[in-house]
Image (cartoon, rainbow, N blue to C red):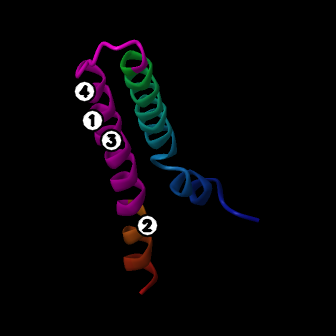
Amino acid sequence: MPDIEETQRERRGVKTRLIGVVLIILGFLNSLLTLRGGLPSEEYLILIAIGVAIFAIGAARSRRDALREIDHET
């Protein structure tokens, strides 16, 4: 049976990545809607960039823990 600490390590960064993905999707959909309306807007590119940055932070957090586990096993 997996330990509670093991499951928490596996899930580290998941919420952060999920928030990043949601921001990317919202920015993308908003930019498509403004383009369809005929008003190009660069504001939503900032939202997409922030989403990518947040996703990268979450990915780095989960990767850092995975590398730490590998170091402890060897």
Look at the numbered discs 4 and 1 and tell me whether their residues touch, using CB distance below 8 Å.
Answer: yes
The reply to whether callout 1 and callout 3 are in contact (CB within 8 Å) is yes
Label 1, residues with CA under 10 Å away: few <14, some 14-19, many ≥20 = some
Q: Is residue 44 above or below residue 3?
A: above
Residue at the spot of label 2: 66
Q: Which of pointers 1 and 2 lies earlier in the amino acid sequence?
A: 1
Q: Quadrant of the C terminus?
A: bottom left
Residue 22 appears at what percent x and percent y? Answer: 48, 31
Residue 2: x, y in percent? 70, 63
Q: Amino acid at mark 1?
A: Ala
Q: Between marks 1 and 2, how big is the CA–CA gap? A: 26 Å
- SS at mark 1? helix
Query: For the magenta stretch, what is the residue range?
Result: 36-64
Query: In the image, is residue 19 above or below residue 57?
Result: above
Q: Which residue is mark 4?
A: 46
Q: Residues within 10 Å of mark 4 (few under 14, many from 20)?
A: few
Front position in the image: 62 or 9? 62
Q: Secondary structure at mark 3?
A: helix
* Residue in front for this viewpoint, 42 or 65: 42
The residue lying at 50 percent from left, 38 percent from top is 18
Dominant secondary-structure state across the stretch colored magenta: helix
Q: Is residue 32 above or below residue 51?
A: above
